[in-house]
Amino acid sequence: MSHKYLTMDDRNKIEVLNKEGYSARKIANILGFHHSTISRELKRCKAEYSAVDSQKYYQELSMKKGRKS
């Protein structure tokens, strides 16, 4: 399984499947990710999972990456 990032489309699918009651492992199998990736993604939101909130959090962390000068 190659390393790839979750896209907004992936996050939307996770949100829908999670609301339909699918487990993290089942969602991972459907989308082609490791189950731990999906578990971490679902834990990212403290309340109910939101694809939009999760994407915002990812973008905030991405901007903090890099060399600190």
Image (cartoon, rainbow, N blue to C red):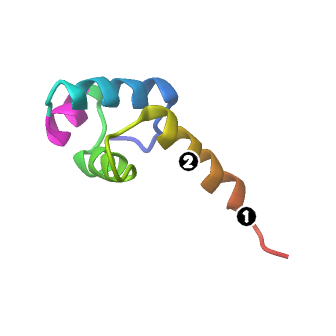
Residue depicted at 23% across the width and 46% down the height: 35
Crowding near the residue tagged with mark 1, few <14, some 14–19, many ≥20 C-alpha atoms within 10 Å: few
- Residue 45 numbered tag: none
Residue 15 falls within the magenta-colored stretch: no
Identify the residue position indicated by label 2 in the image: 58
Q: Which quadrant of the structure image shows residue 20?
A: top left
**1 or 2: tag closer to the N-terminus:** 2
The span shown in magenta is 23-30
Residue depicted at 48% across the width and 42% down the height: 54
Nearer to the camera, 63 or 45: 45
Q: Are marks 1 and 2 in contact (CB under 8 Å)?
A: no
Q: How many labels, in total?
A: 2
Nearer to the camera, 28 or 46: 46
Identify the residue position indicated by label 1 in the image: 66
Quarter of the image that includes the C terminus:
bottom right
Q: Which quadrant of the structure image shows residue 17?
A: top left
